[in-house]
Image: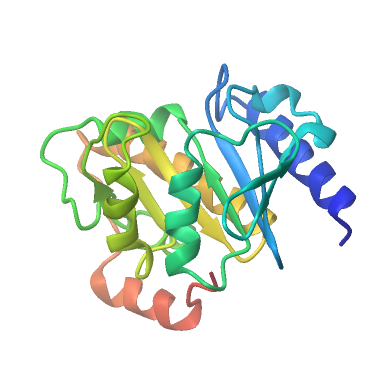
Amino acid sequence: MTETKQREQIAWFARSIFDRGLTHGSTGNISLRLDDGWLMTPTGSSMGAIDPARISRLAADGTLLSGDPPTKEAFLHMAMYGERPRARAIVHLHSTHSVAVSCLCGLDHANVLPAMTAYQVMRVGKLPLVPYFPPGDGALAGAVRKLAARHHCVLLANHGPVVAGISLEEAVHAAEELEESARLYLLLRDQDYRPLDPEQVSELEARFPVKS
């Protein structure tokens, strides 16, 4: 795929995410790993109005080569990519239900969501909670890096999810599955619901291993 097509793909998925209410205002960002650097959505931009020509083009060392300055959360993307060599795309959202879960007390920080559906296990897997840090705090990258080698999806406390995939489509699908799983959890958490049991989860993990 040419870089022009990759830029158009980023803009198309960004608009789709925005139109379906998975992000709002100027929140959220997307990146693609290239052979010699990265493409990232610009800082302060709305996912509903990304101009492909103004998407940030970064060199392998993070130097801005063209386009607008990249998202101020570029360090989150770099931290994930550094631990997941197969990842080709990352999506970071402030999606409502995922953020709501990240604000709850009493969560299992090693795995925030119980296994409620097969596709949650297949596309999200175990979801650890990253401790809260102020936006832009460099320590957040270190906290993400500690978990990224074992998890392609992490949830930032009081902030939102960061999701890696072997393609942009896979990353978006996983982020969408995480948001729907968070919504289900909020609907069910005060009910007498039935999660998948450990044997069912293990079977799914064996049959559908994470690719990213």
- Give the image quarter of residue 147: bottom left
Q: Position of residue 136 (x, y in %)?
A: 37, 33
User: Looking at this rendering, what residue extends furthest in the top direction?
Assistant: 25
Q: Is residue 123 visible?
A: no
Residue 201 higher or lower than 27, as above or below? below
User: Looking at this rendering, what residue extends furthest in the bottom direction?
Assistant: 206
Q: Position of residue 166 (x, y in %)?
A: 62, 66
Which of the pair 191/108 is nearer the observer? Answer: 108
Residue that appears at 70% across and 31% down: 68
Residue 119 higher or lower than 53, as above or below? below
Coloured how? rainbow
Residue that appears at 57% across and 73% down: 86
* Residue 106 relative to residue 63: left or right: left
Q: Position of residue 121 (x, y in %)?
A: 41, 63
Residue 153 higher or lower than 130, as above or below? below
- Give the image quarter of residue 25: top right
Residue that appears at 10% across and 40% down: 106
* Residue 64 relative to residue 146: left or right: right
Q: Is residue 82 visible?
A: yes
Q: Position of residue 14 (x, y in %)?
A: 69, 35
Which of the pair 62/110 is nearer the observer? Answer: 62
* Residue 115 relative to residue 95: left or right: left
Residue that appears at 20% across and 32% down: 104
Which of the pair 3/201 is nearer the observer? Answer: 3
Quarter in which the N terminus is drawn: bottom right
How many discs mark residues in the rendered view? 0
